[in-house]
């Protein structure tokens, strides 16, 4: 059983709290995932990255984590267009003349590729909203039976008046809520703040027979999707729920209302919200030309690790300004870490003479600072700074073989939590000058199309235990 304390900023209480899971040593967490109607952008990924970092760090701290991230493939309606029934998946379907199901699968696939490219540990479940229509129906039916929801012309609304705690997560007061809701007048609602659980619209392409008693054919509201998936896969009560700060209201507020009205229990103990990302100092938008998908960045020649590192260098609750220069800086820093690890690996393998230095103090300091920074509301900036101080310490030292191995072990731990440094670099014996000369001769012969000489050189190299491997930067000698 773990006894360490991790402090997290809980949006529900607006304070930093010591994290206590319901069951000691186990954590149940849910993350609002992508809506699959377009390519995921880097702002979405800053939010998803919190989920992965939290999972990795909790696992490092010996918690057993069960993690669910949903895929919204119905298309969610924004606050503005909810009452008009506009659905982003449907809009995309009309634009591309593809079936909304095809669009959803296409972008789901792209999302999964991005998760892999950015070195995510795959969540234990990645449920699709369309696979949980029946479960949404169960919740809607009970809410109606309890008087928490009502049906008008086939549309089902959650009744805010029956849930006095509405607003407790976002801390919005009644007036604000009413004013916000009055933007769109909907005669069917008893209270302008009521939100849709089920909607009917003949023009909507994705439709289902009502999954509850005496209902009409239609489609679910966005909020109910997350309640159905989280409660079915993790239970009525979750330790942690995360999302972007723009999800806090109305999405998460509505999730709380309908889930708690349904179960009678507190839905989520700790809510974490990621501050949204600015790009070149402004809110990301297609019209401003500062809109980047993950694919856009990878196409510019950056690796998934470099993008991941650039996105995590600022703690999740601080505003972050993304720039390409920032990704370049991430690349430089990753190279510095790689170089330090290579030199340690050479000492550890006996390829380079070991020195007399004891690294125990540097290792202990770096490890403590790294872990303490992350226990402090996942302060990645400070944790990364601790790694860089360690790199300088290592570079200044001439460690013994034993301490070179211990330092490599610590880098492995940094990697397992941050997922940006990769495995310990492969190092091997340097080829002797004679082999290097043969390799140069072979290359010259190949260029002159003298393949007989090139093959002879290759065979001589093989006899010496080396082979030439062609790389984008030219041939390189490796142990055969
Ligand atoms: Zn959600």
Image (cartoon, helix red, strand yellow):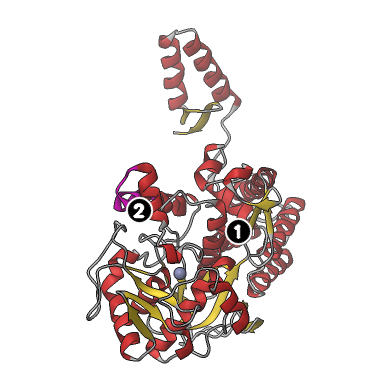
Whether residue 369 is visible, yes or no, is yes
Residue 371 quadrant: bottom right
Residue 314 location in percent, x, y? 68, 60
* Image x and y of residue 202, in percent: 28, 61
Q: Is residue 153 above or below residue 390?
A: below
Q: From the viewer's perspective, is residue 280 above or below residue 22?
A: above
Query: What is the span of residues highlighted in magenta in the rendered image?
Result: 97-108
SS for tag 1?
helix
Dot label at residue 333: none
* Residue located farthest toward the right when viewing the structure as drawn: 396
Instruction: Identify the residue position indicated by label 2 in the image.
Output: 104
Q: State the residue position of label 1.
A: 411
- Cα separation between marks 2 and 1: 39 Å
The image quarter in which residue 335 lies:
top right
Residue 298 coordinates in the image, percent (x, y): 53, 42
Q: Is residue 145 above or below residue 450?
A: below
Q: Nearer the viewer, residue 204 or 383?
A: 204
- Most distant residue in the front direction: 187
Q: Looking at the image, can residue 57 be seen?
A: no
Q: Quadrant of the C terminus?
A: top left
Give the image location of residue 301, x and y in percent: 56, 37
């Amino acid at each position: 059983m773990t006894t360490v304390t991790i402090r997290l900023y809980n949006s529900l209480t607006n304070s930093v709290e010591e994290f206590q899971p319901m069951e000691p040593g186990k954590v149940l967490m849910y993350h609002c995932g992508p809506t699959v109607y377009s390519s995921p952008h880097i702002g979405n990924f800053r939010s998803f990255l919190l989920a992965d970092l939290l999972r990795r760090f909790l696992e490092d701290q010996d918690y057993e984590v069960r993690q669910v991230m949903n895929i919204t493939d119905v298309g969610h309606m924004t606050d503005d267009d909810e009452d008009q029934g506009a659905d982003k998946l449907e809009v995309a379907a009309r634009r591309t003349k593809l079936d909304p199901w095809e669009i959803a699968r296409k972008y789901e696939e792209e999302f999964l590729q991005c998760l892999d490219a950015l070195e995510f540990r795959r969540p234990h479940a990645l449920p699709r909203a369309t696979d949980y229509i029946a479960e949404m129906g169960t919740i809607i039916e009970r809410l109606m039976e309890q008087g928490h929801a009502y049906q008008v012309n086939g549309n089902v609304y959650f009744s805010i008046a029956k849930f006095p705690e509405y607003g407790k997560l976002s801390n919005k007061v009644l007036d604000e809520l009413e004013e916000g809701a009055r933007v769109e007048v909907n005669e069917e609602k008893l209270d302008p703040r009521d939100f849709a659980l089920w909607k009917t619209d003949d023009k909507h392409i994705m439709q289902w027979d009502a999954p509850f008693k005496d209902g009409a054919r239609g489609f679910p509201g966005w909020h109910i999707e997350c309640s159905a998936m989280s409660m079915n896969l993790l239970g009525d009560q979750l330790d942690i729920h995360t999302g972007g700060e723009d999800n806090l209201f109305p999405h998460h507020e509505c999730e709380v209302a309908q889930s708690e009205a349904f179960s009678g229990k507190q839905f989520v103990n700790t809510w974490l919200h990621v501050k949204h990302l600015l790009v070149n100092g402004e809110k990301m938008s297609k019209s401003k030309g500062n809109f980047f998908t993950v694919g856009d960045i990878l196409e510019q020649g950056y690796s998934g690790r470099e993008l991941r590192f650039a996105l995590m260098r600022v703690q999740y609750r601080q505003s972050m300004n993304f720039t390409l220069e920032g990704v370049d800086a991430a690349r430089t820093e990753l190279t510095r870490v790689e170089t330090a690890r290579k030199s340690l690996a050479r000492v550890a393998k006996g390829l380079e003479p070991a020195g007399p230095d004891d690294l125990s103090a540097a290792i202990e300091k770096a490890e403590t600072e790294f872990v303490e920074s992350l226990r402090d509301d996942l302060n990645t900036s400070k944790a990364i700074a601790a790694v860089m101080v360690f790199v300088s310490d290592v570079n200044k030292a001439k460690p013994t073989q034993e301490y070179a191995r211990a330092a490599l072990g610590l880098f492995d731990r940094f990697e397992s939590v941050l997922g940006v440094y990769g495995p310990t670099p492969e190092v091997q014996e340097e080829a002797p000058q004679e082999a290097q000369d043969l390799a140069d001769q072979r290359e010259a012969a190949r260029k002159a199309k003298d393949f007989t000489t090139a093959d002879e050189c290759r065979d001589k190299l093989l006899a010496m235990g080396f082979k030439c491997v062609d790389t984008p930067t030219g041939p390189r000698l490796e142990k055969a």
